[in-house]
């Protein structure tokens, strides 16, 4: 008896020492990752109320939100020069919040930040339901937040990306806990469809869930597919009834594809996510019978494949990799429980895994310090500064009549109406849907009282450049923006 008690105490002491070492490793990992993105997080919050354009989409989204407020047509069948290739739900959210905050751009930024925090936080209970331990899931959530803050500019900008992902993640949380519960599956399908009407590119998670459920319960798979299809058809029919046939035509707008861009961007994200990617591949090879592992691997595989196919689209940003980043971080949380179990020294293996997870965000933090031009909320994130932007907005507002702005937020804050969506207009001309000289003709007529262009700006075609040089002259340039008025 004393021998048994003594052995039990030794085992308990050994377990306590191992648990303490592991807990310290987890805390260290999570703390270092969090510290690496503090500056970016502070910058994101600080920039929300500022009248500085953080992204092309900010002014574009604000104009469409105001169309709802003013009762204008959200999806005209034959748009002039301003287009709408996003579904409507985010515009309703921005219009509603904008009424209370006084500015739909600021409202959209707060919405984006809140949705980002929700999506990041949901990674913890979802990973836990799939088999991860809480501290591993917390470390994975910190890793995800670091990737978003250090490598992207989406946190806290007026764009519906995170709102859509957070909505879908609530549905996923309902599903993974009880994947055969009828009401949970139907509710999950409804939330997935809701996310699609926030941003219609968020199809990866629903597909992954259908693939995963097919390995668990065919009835559940059929129920989810039926719920998705039914709510999607109802939503599309409602939108056509509300907005007319232009809804379908505008969402299917053309876009050029650049193969070299796809290869470069995909390689860059693969390097950033090398450690979570390695964990996911190892899990797929060793623990494919575990339901949580099967979900994580299915989600990560489909998300990565989809991102690689889409990233070559002209104007497509790193947001197409967000599903893959989230899925790989989720797989890391699950893997940190499973992987060391097959190693002769489990605790040593786990510590090495935690150390590896530190690499990506730390490299990102160093990159932000060494390379000021990196995207994100830190150095070089905003174009211009508040004082310069205020001066340019005042100049635009002081010229009566239509204004042409490449950075749409400036014209929006100047109280000008929406005239030209530069990006989508360029895509239409590249695809031959519209003639490039249509806009050039307005410049020849000196239709715009003032023109704002970015420096260096996007390629706008030779017809535009020639007509602009012949009829307009520069009156202000600050390194980020250029203002021109008729000669």
Image (tube, rainbow, N blue to C red):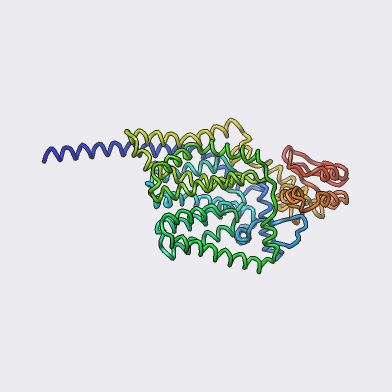
Q: Quadrant of the N terminus?
A: top left
The one nearer the camera, 345 or 224, is 224
Vertical order, 261 against 230 (above or below) = above
> Residue 342: image x %, image y %?
34, 38
Name the one closer to the observer, 105 or 427.
427
Q: Which residue extends farthest bottom? A: 241
The answer to which of 97 and 204 lies nearer the viewer is 204
- In the drawing, does residue 33 fall left or right of residue 251? left
Vertical arrangement, residue 311 with respect to residue 193, above or below:
above
Q: Residue at x 39, y 39 (%)?
A: 26
Can residue 150 be spotted in the picture?
Answer: yes
Corner quadrant of residue 461: top right
Relative to 352, say whether 169 is above or below.
below
**Location of residue 354 in the rendering, given as x and y in whole percent from the top left corner:** 41, 36
The answer to whether one can see residue 33 in this image is: no
Residue at the image position 50 percent from the left and 34 percent from the top: 362
Please tell me which residue is depicted at 43% across the width and 39% down the height of the picture. Answer: 282
């Amino acid at each position: 008896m004393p021998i048994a008690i003594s052995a039990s105490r030794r085992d308990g002491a050994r377990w306590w020492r191992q648990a303490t070492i592991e807990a310290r490793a987890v805390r260290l990992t999570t703390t270092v990752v969090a510290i690496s993105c503090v500056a970016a997080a502070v910058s994101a919050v600080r920039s929300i109320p500022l009248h500085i354009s953080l992204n092309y989409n900010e002014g574009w989204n604000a104009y469409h939100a105001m169309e709802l407020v003013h009762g204008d047509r959200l999806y005209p069948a034959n748009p002039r020069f301003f287009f709408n290739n996003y579904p409507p739900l985010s515009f309703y959210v921005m219009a509603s919040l904008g009424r209370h905050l006084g500015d739909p751009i600021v409202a959209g930024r707060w919405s984006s930040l809140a949705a980002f925090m929700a999506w990041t936080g949901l990674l913890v209970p979802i990973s836990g339901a799939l088999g991860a331990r809480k501290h591993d899931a917390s470390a994975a959530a910190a890793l995800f937040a670091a990737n978003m803050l250090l490598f992207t500019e989406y946190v806290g900008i007026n764009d519906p990306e995170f709102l859509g992902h957070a909505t879908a993640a609530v549905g996923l949380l309902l599903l993974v806990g009880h994947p055969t519960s009828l009401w949970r599956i139907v509710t999950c399908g409804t939330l997935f469809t809701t996310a699609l009407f926030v941003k219609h590119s968020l199809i990866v998670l629903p597909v992954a869930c259908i693939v995963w459920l097919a390995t668990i319960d065919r009835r559940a798979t059929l129920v989810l597919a039926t719920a998705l299809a039914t709510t999607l058809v109802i939503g599309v029919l409602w939108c056509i009834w509300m907005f007319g046939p232009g809804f379908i035509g505008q969402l299917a707008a053309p876009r050029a594809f650049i193969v070299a861009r796809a290869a470069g961007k995909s390689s860059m994200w693969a390097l950033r996510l090398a450690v979570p990617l390695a964990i996911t591949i190892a899990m797929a090879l060793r623990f494919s019978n575990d339901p949580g592992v099967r979900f994580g691997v299915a989600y990560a595989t489909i998300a990565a494949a989809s991102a690689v196919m889409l990233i070559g689209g002209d104007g497509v940003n790193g947001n197409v990799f967000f599903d893959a980043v989230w899925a790989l971080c989720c797989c890391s949380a699950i893997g940190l429980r499973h992987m060391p179990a097959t190693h002769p020294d489990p605790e040593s293996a786990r510590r090495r895994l935690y150390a590896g997870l530190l690499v990506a965000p730390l490299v990102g933090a160093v990159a932000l310090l060494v390379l000021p031009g990196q995207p994100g909320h830190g150095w070089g994130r905003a174009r211009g500064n508040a004082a310069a932007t205020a001066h340019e907005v005042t100049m635009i507002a002081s010229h009566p009549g239509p204004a042409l702005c490449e950075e749409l937020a400036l014209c929006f804050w100047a109280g000008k109406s929406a005239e030209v969506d530069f990006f989508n207009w360029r895509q239409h001309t590249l695809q031959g849907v519209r003639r490039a000289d249509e806009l050039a003709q307005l410049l020849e007529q000196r239709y715009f009282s003032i023109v704002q262009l970015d420096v260096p700006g996007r390629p706008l075609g030779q017809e535009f450049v020639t007509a602009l040089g012949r009829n307009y002259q520069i009156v202000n340039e600050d390194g980020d923006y250029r203002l021109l008025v008729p000669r």
